[in-house]
Amino acid sequence: MADLGPLRVPRRADRPSGLQARLRSLFAVPAWGKRPEPRVRYGEPFLPGVAALGRQHLAEARPLLERAEAVRGRRFEYFGRTVAFPGQIDWEPQGLPTDWTVALNALDDLIPLGVAAALAPTMDVRARWYAAAIGLVREWTGTGEPGPGVGWQPPALARRIPNLIHSYIFFGRELRADPPARKLFLDGLYTQAVALAAAVRGVPQDHRLIAAGRALFFAGRFFDGMEARGWLDAGSTILWHQLREQVHEDGGHRARTPVVHALVLADYLELVAFIRAANDDVPPWALKRVKTMADFLARIVHPDDELPLFHRSALGVARPVRELLATAAVVLHEPALASPGDLPGIWPLLVVGEGGRRRHASLPRSRPPTEPRALRRTNYYVLPGDPGDVMLLDGGTPPADGDAGVLGYELSVGGSRLIVGSGVGDHEPDPWRGFFGTRRAHNTVVCDDADETTPTGEVSDVRWIMRDGLLFYSGTWDGGAGEEPRIRHRRRVFCMPGRFWLVADELLGSGAVEAESMIHLHPDVRLAAGCRGAPGFAVSRSPDASVAIVAAGVHEVRVVHGVDGDRPQGWYAPRHGERRAAPALALVAIGRLPLVVGYALLPRFAGAAELAFQHDAFQLQATLRLEGREYRMTVLQDDIELAISG
């Protein structure tokens, strides 16, 4: 829980005591006609790019315009589910996930409506967009007094307050000409800020607390008065304290979830852009920490500029990576993060304004190639190959709410994803929800036909070595790869950039076991099997995006594709509500422990290759032969030796 003991939000002595009584006095409709309208501070740099929006941005704004049309038609889509309300909106509809209801109550759709108004070809069209936006606000405001519902809880309040402030910026002209609507709007917004300030002490110290701090900060800069100043102080304290607490020195958010990292980075980029536009100071250490967050994001994305699907991450939830990095390049003055071409997207323009767009255009484009990197505090590892080739390895203990894909990875070759995580199924009914969280849905090892969805144990004995051009990672999952803790899973990954990646899975313990090392492929790949003395496969999406898989220590190989029923397998869900059949390989190893199974990944390789393992209680030796050369890698205790011959 958040410890905000030293924070004090000023209270006026003449107001009713107690949160419910105080909120009721603010929210009660009869009182609105008697209370003075809350004072708004003018000249604050909220969304400086609104004035720069024009018809030239129609193409980039197309997704927002389509969403605005849907909202005007009373259709709301979140997490892949669309619900239409022909009559009055049900703000807490039955049978939908809580996340969906929070998104509905957050009024995120006010921003698309505002963009549509800014790009309207005529004043009559703009007036219709204003009517849709103020109608949505009126309908939400008319739901009743503050209470225990989802809309009055911190997650929805923290998102709705900035959305309302931004909507006021989009429709300031119309609201100034419509005093009753303006008073309704400002009274409701003020009431919600009071509610969030009173409830913030109960918010867990995670990304939701950062969102609440952002909302209080913006409310404190939007309104004038002593109470608003208290919100500003409280929001600032939360934001800077949680930046230090939640973001590691390597730039990664402690949740270890890429989509959460992207959401938090967007909050801080908007905050820093606002403070600098207001000619205020950002603590130097905070600027450095936000920069490391942007660097971290740039390192863990695929060459297609999209997030890896680790720990229930999904595409389309956070801001696009290109937009985040381009905004960071402008706000933090970091040319290496700049995107090719013009400033991408509508959100960056809104945040940095026309001046920021010009700065982005003048930045040199010098994004460096992907480099080997051990992000040790967050436990992600980057093993690159030639340009466009990279393995992203999740080498740490899963978060409490993460998936069970311990020591999993994703692989891009030639700029395209070939080996992928299966994706997200949090908002799907069973058995899909259960499948996407299991080890069977990730590129890791499953033992004894286990399907655990709750990660247990810890990853320990982590090693990262760079020697003689070879990259080496080793980590041991002590939670066990099977149903009993008698089995430990040690994954070793060798990388000779531009030549190969080699994955060796050691199963340690006693007794006999049947294990499957899973490899999940992108649904757009072409898969061909071959056998030249050992199982092998060719995986490709194009001549440049191809990889050969050569296995060792394998009893048999099972290939599945789009299996449903009680135990699904062979599916890819990169976005909420999207599910595609995709090939999945299961390399089966059967025997007594200790046991080794593994495979080599050879980019753009079409020749003959051979892989073999030798192991005992003290060492592991992997020998890879290809194109007349032999690579022998020996791991002894904590050291590694590489011998190349031929």
Image (cartoon, rainbow, N blue to C red):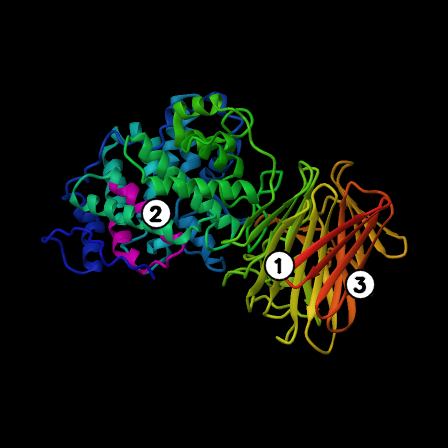
Q: Is residue 202 magenta?
A: yes
Label 2 sits on residue: 140
Q: Which mark is residue 553?
A: 3
Instruction: Classify 10 Å Cα crowding around label 2: few (below 14), some (14-19), many (20 and above).
Output: some
Q: Give 129 or 554, whichever is nearer the viewer.
A: 554
Q: How many marks?
A: 3
Select label 2 or label 1 by which is in front. Answer: 1
Q: Which mark is residue 366?
A: none
The amino acid on which the numbered mark 3 sits, given as a three-letter code, is Gly
Dominant secondary-structure state across the stretch colored magenta:
helix
Q: Give 19 or 309, whichever is nearer the viewer.
A: 309
Tell me which residue sits at (55%, 66%) in the image.
458
Label 1 sits on residue: 407
**Residue 570 seen in the current view:** no
Q: Position of residue 108 (x, y in %)?
A: 42, 43
Q: Do callouts 2 and 1 mark residues in contact (Cβ within 8 Å)?
A: no
Instruction: Classify 10 Å Cα crowding around label 1: few (below 14), some (14-19), many (20 and above).
Output: many
Tell me which residue sits at (75%, 59%) in the image.
598
Q: Position of residue 534 (x, y in %)?
A: 86, 57
Q: CA distance from mark 3 to mark 2?
A: 61 Å
The amino acid on which the numbered mark 2 sits, given as a three-letter code, is Trp
Residue 457 image-quadrant placement: bottom right
**Highlighted range, magenta:** 194-220
Q: Earlier in the sequence, mark 3 or mark 2?
A: 2
Tell me which residue sits at (36%, 42%) in the image.
286
Helix, strand or loop at label 1? It is loop
Q: Position of residue 259 (x, y in %)?
A: 51, 48
Helix, strand or loop at label 2? It is helix
Q: CA distance from mark 2 to mark 1?
A: 45 Å
